[in-house]
């Protein structure tokens, strides 16, 4: 990992430089080629560490403010490591999903024809056609309703027409 340590209002000592390099080894294990730019600075009683890592075309950045510079560096490395783990997990998940999609697309689809694939069961009540229409209106998700016509004693089906305002009835002839 290519590391640049910059100090603003703080002199970058060999100890600080070594500590930063040691801590960035935790980040380096996630990428083959990466670079990091570390900026340390002091403002009032706070020691601030800002780290920007560039790897594989991605940019990860974090900053931390603590009373102690070493604590600030530790915290910023923890934040970066969390960001990188989240990114890696998300990327791996996307790779798995895309490979599954490719497998699904490549498998031949078997088309089923002339088979009964679904059965629906309905309670059939004796109703007048007008009552059947009211019952169907009370069920907005249903498109039809089987019933026994009180006038003819035959099993009929009332259904909604495509205009959405009117109804049709199917009644057997025999």
Image: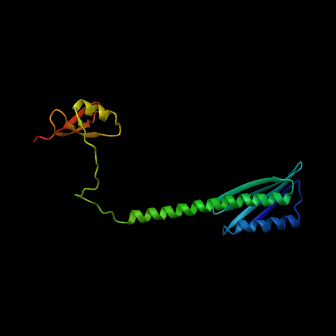
Coordinates of residue 65 in the picture (x, y in percent): 81, 52
**Residue 70 horizontal side relative to residue 55, left or right:** right
Q: Splitting the image into 4 quarters, where does residue 116 fall? A: bottom left
| Position of residue 61 measured from the top left corner of the image (x, y, whole percent) | 71, 55
Q: Residue at x 57, y 61 (%)?
A: 91
Residue beneath the point at 53% across and 60% down: 94
Residue 164 visible, this orientation: no
Q: Residue at x 27, y 39 (%)?
A: 145
Q: Residue at x 25, y 39 (%)?
A: 125
The quadrant where residue 124 appears: top left
Question: Which is more toward the observer, 108 or 134?
Answer: 134
Residue 170's place in the image compared with 82, above or below, is above
Would residue 134 appear left or right of 78 to someone viewing this image?
left
Res. 48 in view: yes
Specify the quadrant that holds the N terminus. bottom right
Q: Nearer the viewer, residue 131 or 18?
A: 131
Residue 22 screen position, x and y as percent: 79, 68
Instruction: Please give the count of numbered marks on the rendered protein.
Output: 0
Name the image quarter holding residue 162.
top left
In the depicted structure, whether residue 139 falls above or below residue 93: above
């Amino acid at each position: 990992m290519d590391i640049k340590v910059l100090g603003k209002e703080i002199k970058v000592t060999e100890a600080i430089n070594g500590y930063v390099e040691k801590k960035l080894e935790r980040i380096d294990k996630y990428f083959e080629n990466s670079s990091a730019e570390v900026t340390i600075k002091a403002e009032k009683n706070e020691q601030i560490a800002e780290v920007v890592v560039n790897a594989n075309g991605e940019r990860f950045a974090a900053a931390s403010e603590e009373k102690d510079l070493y604590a600030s560096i530790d915290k910023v490395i923890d934040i970066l490591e969390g960001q990188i783990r989240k990114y890696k997990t998300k990327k791996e998940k996307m790779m798995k999903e895309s490979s599954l999609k490719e497998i699904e697309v490549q498998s031949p689809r078997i088309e089923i024809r002339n088979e009964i694939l679904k059965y629906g069961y309905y309670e059939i009540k004796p109703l007048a056609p007008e009552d059947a229409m009211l019952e169907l209106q009370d069920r907005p998700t249903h498109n039809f309703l089987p019933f026994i016509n009180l006038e003819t004693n035959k099993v009929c089906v009332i259904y909604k027409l495509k205009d959405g305002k009117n109804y049709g009835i199917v009644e057997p002839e025999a």
